Image: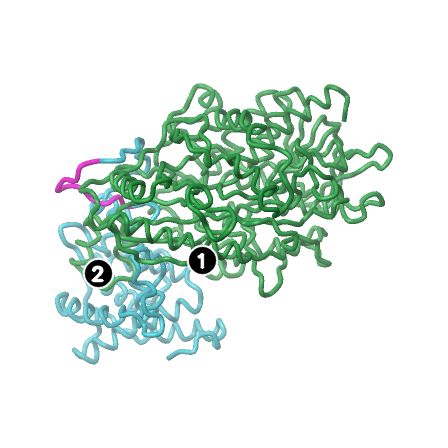
Chain colours: A green, B cyan
Amino acid sequence: MFDAIVIGSGMSGGIAAKELCERGLKTLVIERGRKIEHGADYTDWMQPWETPNANMIPEEELASDYAVQRQCYAVSAATQQYWVKDSEHPYTTPADKPFAWIRGYHLGGRSLMWGRQSYRLAPIDFEANAKDGHGVDWPIRYDDLAPWYDHVERFIGVSGSKEGLDQLPDGEFLPPFGLNDAEIQFKQAVEAKFPGRKVIPGRVANLSHAQPHHEELGRTSCQNRSLCERGCTYGAYHSSLSSSLPAAERTGNLTIVTDAIVHSIVHDPKTGKATGVRVIDTHTKKHRTYEAKVIFGCASTIGTAQILLNSKSQAFPTGLANSSDMVGRNLMDHVYAVTVVGVLPGGPNSYYHGRRPTGLYIPRFRNVTENGDFLRGFGYQGAVLRPGWRSTLLGKPGIGAELKKRGRGLAPWVVAMAGFGEMLPNPDNRVTLSDKTDQWGMPIVHIDCAMGENEHKIAEQIVADGKAMIQAAGGFVLSGESKPGVPGLGIHEMGTARMGKDPKTSVLNKFNQAHDVPNLFITDGSAMTSSGCQNPSLTYMALSARAADHAAKLLKEGAI
Amino acid sequence: MLDLPSLDRRALLGRAALLLGVTAAGGLSAPALAEAAARAKPFLAAPAFALLSAVADTIIPVTDTPGAVEARVPALLDGLFANWASAERKVELAAALTRIDARAQSEHGKPFAALAPEVRTTLLAAHDAEALKPAPKDKGVGSAGLSLGLGTGATDPGYAKLKDLVIILYYSSEIALTQELSYEHAPGEWKPSIPITPDTRPQGAGPY
């Protein structure tokens, strides 16, 4: 019998485990994937010439085993070990509604491969649903979460600049990875032409300058290698393996079980509480059960929905904590893969050294300082760089000495901006269980999700505004694609067990506690009531820490 | 044109072998021949490897820095044939090589690898210019500043892919990254502004 079970060891589960352990709770973390050792199992040591097959996964293997995962930018031979084989972990979608579920099943989950961009939601984000009537109102406001953002930022280490923007609150930052000269020039041009728009250094969970509390965990400052998604032996970015699980472990209260797929959460109708978690051993396929006083669901948005929907009982015939019928619904991602690229011919005569782990960010301005003919808004991630040989040589005519000369010359400055747009909650975008089962006997998920009219309008505006900013900086536009990528590719799934005030229309209360099951907390992306346009992991971590604190108090009081 | 999707894997491999088998050996440089002999498990037969070596050497020759052959690009590309390329890709790459050889035969009556270096350069430069013209139906694709694709949209996609692989292997090599470009595995500090000097070289790795 444990005090707490945390299902999943990724971004949310790592923080939940740390916070629970630090409050004296004997905590079991259950991970469906295999164990990975921090450092020893990483591939960040590989020089470019040491990667197998020029860092390309063999084509037939890529096609047969990674049909979905291959769409993710971070998939390469050096990171191959971190992605699920789609052939072994199937799911279904309607034929005309593809959804890209990008995943990694191993200790640490996607915290190993995440993009590390870390932005707070703002007061307007927590108010948005109430204001325009889409979804239900968040049961919390920015001020409820602000201290927990502080807490998490301090622990994980977020580099960034203080900007004083209402729509993108400042945090507890390490020094930013500064803008280069071309980005400063771009910033000045954009901010002069469009008052209210800001070009700022990307806020990123990489240690620009490690602090003593980071070094205590064996973490050191970022070496500007930009090899993050291979795993970082320096521990320079926050992941469960470099940061949260070691912090949990040093309390002496942590137990980790890997290779255990959660089948369902066990519910006792007499007490109304969850009593434990039933797992399937990945290798033997045998079932066993772990018991605990409190359970945290951190299996990721789609994984958590799958577990809840599969936890059927007489009391919950449609799945645990699903009296509202909202489990699995309101699946959101961000409007993604809408990118504008241009050349800045009048860029500065300078260069930069190192490969910083971030770029520039343009916080939301539509429906903040400028109107839009759509609801909500978007931000941009991007950079102004002198592209390397891949851009200057591949696909281009020319051979011999001329080719080498071109490769050796510094390219002109190129600005690339990728919009991230808010997706409205829509109950018809949902995860259900199919009749088919996987090799472990788990019903596989069916994902039915599509971008709506508002998302397409946002995509159009991302391109129009991006082009205008490139032109304002004296550049010319090379490309601008306004068709959003397949949902899921943003890898920001959320919403399938939303927080809300009313148990009839939401799954979780203001402390991420299931309305229906008082000792069940869900703190991964499924808790999100709306999506904002900010990269969401920081918010999942803040919600996890806050919920863990609350759960520990309730346990101490004997209330759950 | 080959109707690739309609061919099964066995047929494709047979076709690749056929395409590569017709290539005659030619007068390559001593290092390239030594490299051919040193390959552990060669995928390409010696004549095909000689052709590949001549093509790679012509795309990226020795200048004031070493070229593709010194960076072991032919052997590494042989490895890609064996360990990376799909059956369709093998045929496509082999056919692209064979077209270069056929052009050499037709214009000079000799295999490509047997031509003098300056003749090879003239021939391949013309071939390259024609092959990499955007295909009419895909105008613009692959010509944008951020093209990362393997030759999509070119008139001769097989040649475009072959050439891209030569470039990728060369510019991922230790020779290119330390002598042609600059590369530090762990740069340490991020310096957002440094002056450009005559010695400044592009960083050999980065997001694009």
Q: Nearer the viewer, residue B173 or A456?
A: A456
User: In the displayed structure, does residue A390 sit left or right of residue A522?
Assistant: left
Give percent across and percent down for residue A15.
57, 30
Residue extent of the magenta highlight: B194-204
Q: Residue B57 — which label?
A: 2
Residue plotted at (48% across, 62% down): A60
Q: Nearer the viewer, residue A171 or A28?
A: A171
Residue A514, magenta (yes or no): no
Q: Are marks 1 and 2 in contact (CB under 8 Å)?
A: no
Amino acid at dot 1: Pro
Query: Which residue is tagged 1?
Result: A58
Give percent across and percent down for residue A483.
45, 59
Crowd band around label 1 with a 10 angstrom C-alpha radius: few (<14), some (14–19), many (20+): some
Looking at the rendering, in which quadrant would you find the C terminus of chain A? top right
Q: Secondary structure at mark 2?
A: helix
Considering only vertical position in the picture, is A543 above or below A429? above
Does residue A234 appear anywhere in the picture? no
Q: Assign the magenta stretch its main secondary structure.
A: loop
Q: Chain of mark 2?
A: B
Report which quarter residue B187 is drawn in.
top left
User: In the displayed structure, does residue A211 sit left or right of residue A254?
Assistant: left
Q: Secondary structure at mark 1?
A: loop
